[in-house]
Amino acid sequence: MISQILIATRNPDKAEEIKEIFGNRGFRIRTLLDFNHAEEIQEDGNTLQENALKKAREAFKMIRIPTIADDTGLEVDRLFGAPGVYSARYAGEDANYEDNMQKLLHEMATVPIRDRSARFRTIAAYYDGEHSVTTEGVVEGMITTEPRGENGFGYDPVFETLETKQTFAEMNQKAKEAISHRGRALRNLFLELQNRKILP
């Protein structure tokens, strides 16, 4: 019986979002922030799936707790799918949320509204030393011409969803979780793990 699950992240914003989604399933949720000895995991894969699986496997090897990891990319059609797998470091290795967002807005500055389609894609991965499972979650939307909203993190202020016509940053946490790419990927993962009898 699994009593705890490790979320392979040190990002407190992401950890909180995942805990909200996965934390009511009857498991104790841990993150890499709980383990001082956990080494940094390099996200050097060429795809979101490679990165998610690598993080799950490497974190499991270090902590020996069944592990969930994810990787998310913002795919902008006008930019041929960029920033994609490089979303977290779009403006450079040391870039912060604001740097990445401003670079995206600059590159899209002359693009008309009709051509600003984009999507958030998350791959969620589970690994426990025996089982390896991945699932996907996608949200379609568009890139706004300027930031809107005060909530969320990353590209949330400039990503308007087709379903709500709001940016993720204009939604409260509960509303975002209901449709978010990460939420969809994690809920799909939980169902897949139940279907395979890995989780109760």
Image (cartoon, helix red, strand yellow):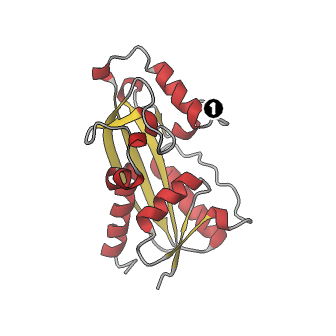
| Residue drawn 42% across the image and 72% down it | 24
Residue 20 shows up from this direction: yes
| Residue drawn 37% across the image and 50% down it | 176
In this view, the residue in front, 121 or 27, is: 27
Q: Residues within 10 Å of mark 1 (few under 14, many from 20)?
A: few
Residue 153, compared with residue 80, is above or below; it is below
Q: Position of residue 61 (x, y in %)?
A: 63, 69
Q: Position of residue 189 (x, y in %)?
A: 37, 64
Q: At label 1, which amino acid type do we have?
A: Gly
> Which element carries disc 1, helix, strand or loop?
loop
| Residue drawn 50% across the image and 54% down it | 52
From the image, tell me which residue sits under label 1.
92
In this view, the residue in front, 118 or 109, is: 109
Q: Position of residue 20 (x, y in %)?
A: 44, 63
Residue 133, compared with residue 64, is above or below; it is above
| Residue drawn 35% across the image and 62% down it | 187
In this view, the residue in front, 140 or 102, is: 102
